Amino acid sequence: MSEYCATGTEADPAPTADGPPFAECVLCREPTEYPESYKGITLCPVCEWQEAQRTACSG
């Protein structure tokens, strides 16, 4: 994955869950790659990709 599409940074990487329970996506309620204890907006891989496409094209 290129740095352009990364959700975290090297200094502050995005957390990943080792196993269930996973947090729900705030848009479609599907399981995400984030642990249930993750604070903030959680998106599943599909919604995360779609959001990246929208923000990349919004200028």
Image (spheres, rainbow, N blue to C red):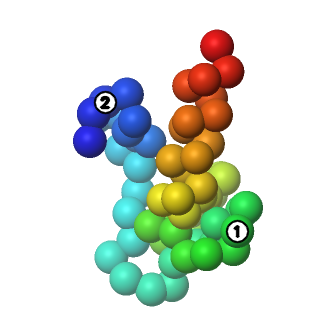
The answer to whether residue 36 of the structure is visible from this angle is: no
Q: Tell which residue pokes out farthest to the top in this image.
A: 59
- Tag 2 residue: 3
Q: Is residue 35 left or right of residue 25?
A: left
Q: Nearer the viewer, mark 1 or mark 2?
A: 1
Quadrant location of the N terminus in the rendered image: top left
Residue found 64% across the figure and 66% down from its top: 25
Where residue 9 sits: x, y (%)? 36, 34
Q: Residue furthest right?
A: 27
- Residue 52 is drawn in which quadrant? top right
> Mark 2: which secondary structure?
helix
Left or right of 27 on screen, residue 38: left
Front-most of 2 and 12? 2
Please tell me whether mark 1 sits on a helix, a strand or a loop. loop
- Disc sitting over residue 18 in the figure: none
Q: Are marks 1 and 2 in contact (CB under 8 Å)?
A: no
Q: Residue at x 60, y 23 (%)?
A: 57
Amino acid type of the residue tagged 1 in the rendering = Cys
Q: Say which residue label 1 marks.
A: 28
Q: Is residue 14 above or below residue 39?
A: above
Residue 51: where, in percent of width, then height? 61, 42
Camera sees residue 51: yes
Residue 31 spot, x, y in % from top left: 55, 76
Sequence-first disc among 1 and 2: 2
Residue at image location 56% in from the left, 25% down from the top: 56
Distance from the alpha carbon under mark 1 to that under mark 2: 26 Å
**Badge 2: how crowded within 10 Å, few (<14), some, or many (20+)?**
few
